[in-house]
Image (tube, helix red, strand yellow):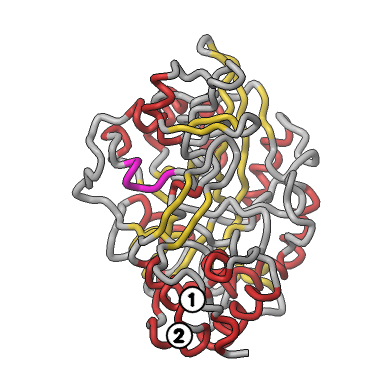
Amino acid sequence: MRIFADFHIHSKYSRAVSPRMELPEIYEGAKEKGINLIGTGDFTHPLWFKHLKENLERSQYKGIYKLKGRGEEVLFMLTVEVSTIVSTKNGVKKTHHVVHAPDFEIAEQINNVLGRRSNLSADGRPIIGKCSPAELAEMLFEISSKIVLVPAHVWTPWFGLFGSKSGYDSIEGAFEDQARKIFALETGLSSDPAMNWRVSALDRFALVSNSDSHSAHTNKIGREANVFEIEKEKLSFEEIFDAVKKKDKKRFLRTIEFFPQEGKYHYDGHRNCHFSCSPEEAKKLNNICPICGKPLTLGVLHRVEDLADRPKNFIPENAVPFSHLIPLSEVIADVEGVGVFTKTVNLIYEKLIKKFGSEFRIMLDASKEEIEKIAGKAVARAIANVRNEKVKIEPGFDGEYGKIEIDLKEKKQKSLGEFV
């Protein structure tokens, strides 16, 4: 059974999230994308937890749930992102973590424990003050050894475990004696596995990729994902994470990644000053913005360079493969020279979905000739070029997404006009 999984999303109860992020909307967005296993996000929030308990029921797979009144085309796993903040001799450390619970009973115990340290009603992503990653891990694993704790978007500046603004230099520095219980890391949108492979200290960890989506639109949900092949009769919470932990390439096939340059924190820079640069350039500037004179926000690539002990293009022996993708709506928008949410893009997108069933089917499996019949030559050529990584990207920095241009010799062939 092929599983496309996105474990890290948020509900409408988290800050800066679409008010439409409720289970039916998430179900439909995931189905259209091609995601068939998705995290619930935010299960610590009392109102969202109530919504989950009322609308989810056990599926035929242990530790995995289905939406009442719907089929099992999209399944759910109980997840939440938790933020820890602690003062240390090396400054304040702020770290995000994705917590996976195997059932509602254990999720409720987690809520009870974290509720003593935080106002869980304040936000879908609870903040646990005066708490280190090690303390969080200890609290969780005392509840159940089945809980899975994954450091989230580990390289992002402010809340990544290795982040330039408040991060650590090692997993052990963050988790202390609990580090041995951590077996996976989330790469985040601004890094990909190849960047992480340059740090030999990370070799023992599996690398997972998730969307951290704040919207059910298919250019957000599933923009990063994990691909599994699990025997249907064996599918369960424990089987999924056993495949991850063992980096079993027969079961954990690969991850689907953003081009990391498209991420909001890939390069160094200052958004307000409209200035960005590579790590090499930043070091020549002593990491100081030449426009305002203040320290630059050092991005993911800079931190990878700081900790790397291997050259670029190094591939560990047991590495799980990955591939880069761009969301289909962004591909169409680039070809047409219009915005992602325009009628032009939506018309082409819906015709493709009607034919192929899901975005991943289109982006990963459909032939160029099949796509061309529906969407025209320009879109078909653009999708082929994304698969072959023929793209140009102006790297993102300091909270600004990178700007993508797909490498097309004939940029615009007004593909919409070919079938209207």
Mark 2 or mark 1: whose residue is earlier in sequence: 2
Residue 14 to residue 89: above or below:
below
In percent of width and height, residue 217 lies at 65, 65
Which mark identifies residue 372? 2
Few, some or many residues within 10 Å of mark 1 (<14, 14–19, 20+): many
- Under mark 2, the amino acid is Glu
Q: Position of residue 38 (x, y in %)?
A: 57, 62
Amino acid at circle 1: Val
Give the camera-side residue of 353 and 1.
Answer: 353
Q: Which residues are magenta?
A: 191-196
Q: Nearer the viewer, residue 17 or 57?
A: 17
Q: Residue sitting at 26 percent across and 34 percent down?
A: 200
Determine which quarter of the picture holds residue 306: top left
Dot 1 corresponds to which residue?
379
Name the residue nearer the viewer: 109 or 411: 411
Looking at the rendering, in which quadrant would you find the N terminus?
bottom left
Q: Work out whether 209 lies above or below 68.
A: above
Vertical relation: 28 (above or below) 63: below
**Label 1 residue SS:** helix
Tell me if 330 is positioned left or right of 184 in this view.
right
Of the numbered discs in the image, which one, if any, rests on residue 228? none
Magenta: main secondary structure? helix
Report the label total: 2
CA–CA distance in space, label 2 to label 1: 7 Å
Residue 139 in view here: no
Residue 80 is left or right of residue 318, and the answer is right
- Label 2 with label 1: CB-CB less than 8 Å: yes
Judge whether residue 416 is colored magenta: no
Residue depicted at 73% across the width and 32% down the height: 118
- Asked whether, in this view, residue 72 is left or right of residue 303, the answer is right
